[in-house]
Image: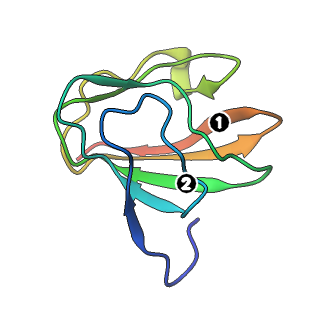
Amino acid sequence: MPTFGSKWVGLAVNDATPDVSGGEIFYTQNTAATDITDFDGGVEGKRILILVMDANTDFFNSDTVLRLLGGTDWDTPNIYDTIEFIFRAGVWYEVHRQVN
């Protein structure tokens, strides 16, 4: 869970591997179709929460980098959907998804 007082940080626009080292709570702002395949800046135990704020972001499942629940891609999430990950042993694991 993000800590109290965490600030919202925009992920880099149209970046398939955005850097998350500068925060815990992020929002998407892609202007073109973007498959997120990984997050840069992961450290053991880091948790991140992503709020989808555009209609251009998809999440690409990979057993070795970005592991989504059910082992499938999350295509075309809705605006205001959220997804949360934890970083362990070099892999981002999805721990929660909220479809709004």
Identity, as a three-letter code, of the amino acid under mark 1: Trp
In the depicted view, which residue is nearer to us: 80 or 13?
13
Instruction: Determine the image quadrant of residue 79.
Output: top left
State which quarter of the image contains the N terminus.
Answer: bottom right
Label 1's element?
A: strand
Identify the image quadrant of residue 64: top right
How dense is the environment of label 2, judged by Cα within 10 Å: few (below 14), some, or many (20 and up)?
A: many
Residue at the spot of label 2: 48
Among the two numbered marks 1 and 2 on one chain, the one whose residue lies closer to the N terminus: 2
Q: Which mark is residue 19?
A: none
Badge 2 marks a residue whose secondary structure is: strand
Task: State if disc 2 and disc 1 touch (CB < 8 Å).
Answer: yes
Q: Position of residue 39 (x, y in %)?
A: 56, 38
Q: Is residue 12 above or below residue 62?
A: below
30 on left or right of 39: left
- Residue 95 image point, x, y percent: 58, 43
Task: Name which residue lies at 55% across and 54% down.
Answer: 48
On screen, residue 60 above or below 13: above
Residue of label 1 = 92
Q: Which residue appears at 50% of the width and 24% of the height?
A: 37
For the residues labelled 1 and 2, the Cα–Cα distance comes to 9 Å
Residue 15, position as x, y percentages in the image: 39, 33
Around disc 1, counting alpha carbons within 10 Å, would you say few (fewer than 14), some (14 to 19), or many (20 or more)? many
